[in-house]
Image (cartoon, rainbow, N blue to C red):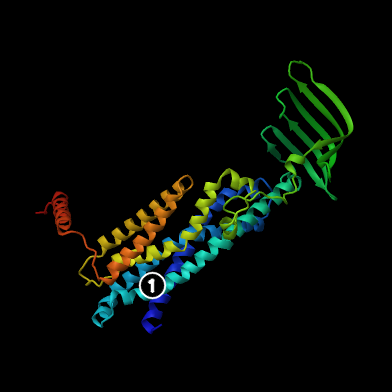
Amino acid sequence: MGSIDRYIFRTTLASFALVLVSLTGVIWITQALRGIDLMTSQGQTILTFLGITGLVIPSLLGVIAPIAVMIAVSHTLNKLATDSEIIVMNAAGMSPFRLFRPFMYATCVVAVMVTLLAAYISPDGLRRIKQWDAEITADVLANILQPGSFKQLDQDLTIRIRERAPGGELKGILIDDRRDPKERNTIIADHGTVVKNADGSFLVLEDGNLERFEAGKREPTMVAFGRYAFDMSKFSSQGHDVALGIRERYLWELISPDENDPIYKQIPGQFRQELHDRFLAPIYPFAFAALTFAFLGAPRTTRQSRNFSMGSAILAVFGVRMAGFACSVMTVKTPVAALVQYVMLFGVIGLSVWIIVGSVVVEPPPALMEAINRSNARLARLFRRPATA
């Protein structure tokens, strides 16, 4: 790799890293705000919140990386064109295809990163999120029930505790249970403890009263108890047997799924969709880089506008990405849609390379430019301020 290649390679990767971090940070914040209830309603620490929300970052990187490549390539080419470096390189005998080589080196680095993310890192992070969430749910009594606040564990089940004593004892317990439409139970206990055994998890209440309102009766039934076990098994599962979704599967698990997997039997089309999305993930950076260079890589003088080429590159990348999403959705029911997506991406790469090798300058048609100039002239006359005397 020569000095010029190293210069372009470093500039492109530096721009890519900056854009990737910036876009990922913005999108991660919007995603993280959805999980703020981990601290507000489930009593988790800031470290737990950051840990769980941070595990989604690899998934975001895989989606954002191709877009960041496009922005990095366009930024580098615009920098080279602004400094007239592309003109100098072309005058020195460097063809556009030769100039394209360091951009391909940088794209290869990105493609390797995206492959690792899609094959292992991203699904592993999603697995850890699901496992962590299951563990938090399993310890619901220790994490969600906060002294002095009413917590709604189910649609019609509310619990409040006054304080936590040493040893895990709960004091001043109030339970309002309206899950049975035929009756409503209100339980008040002086204290209680959490007991877990082979039969499930129970909140053992001591020294309290149970007030039961039955449908069709005017007066409630009052029961004083010395010891009462309230079943909390629904809210205190062990969280070790976590059912993995499709996105949590590693690449090799999608290539050869278990034929007896109930999820695979139910939705085999989504397995196919996810598998092809993983295969296509490292191809998108090459398609976007080649497409961007095809529009912006040709040598131009400083007097030649690059705005049309820049806008065309953005629209072309956007169109390819939207078409890819559409094909991905259709792959669930129509397997041939995956083939269409492969043909589209390799066709875009082939067409872009043909434009680069042929040194074709993508410019707007003269008739279009004349129409735009006439329109701009009319607008200028319309909004021109009258000359002052």
Q: Nearer the viewer, residue 225 or 164?
A: 225
Q: Quadrant of the N terminus?
A: bottom left
Give the residue type at disc 1. Answer: Phe
User: Mark 1 sits on what residue?
Assistant: 103
Residue 214 pos. (x, y %) = 76, 20
Residue 20 pos. (x, y %) = 47, 64
385 on left or right of 67: left
Q: Nearer the viewer, residue 338 or 105?
A: 338
Q: Nearer the viewer, residue 313 or 343?
A: 343
The single residue placed furthest to the front in the displayed view is 259
Q: Is residue 203 above or below residue 184?
A: below
210 on left or right of 36: right
Q: Using the rendered view, name the quadrant where residue 186 is placed.
A: top right
Q: Is residue 201 above or below residue 187?
A: below
Q: What SS does tag 1 mark?
A: helix
158 on left or right of 273: right
Q: Nearer the viewer, residue 267 or 210?
A: 267
Residue 68 visible in the current orientation: no
Q: Residue at x 84, y 29 (%)?
A: 209
Q: Residue at x 50, y 61 (%)?
A: 61
How many C-alpha atoms fall within 10 Å of the one at disc 1: few (<14), some, or many (≥20)? many
Q: Is residue 25 above or below residue 382?
A: below
15 on left or right of 82: right
Q: Using the rendered view, name the quadrant where residue 288 is placed.
A: bottom left
Residue 373 visible in the current orientation: yes
Q: Residue at x 79, y 44 (%)?
A: 163
Residue 293 pos. (x, y %) = 33, 67
Q: Is residue 17 above or below residue 88?
A: above
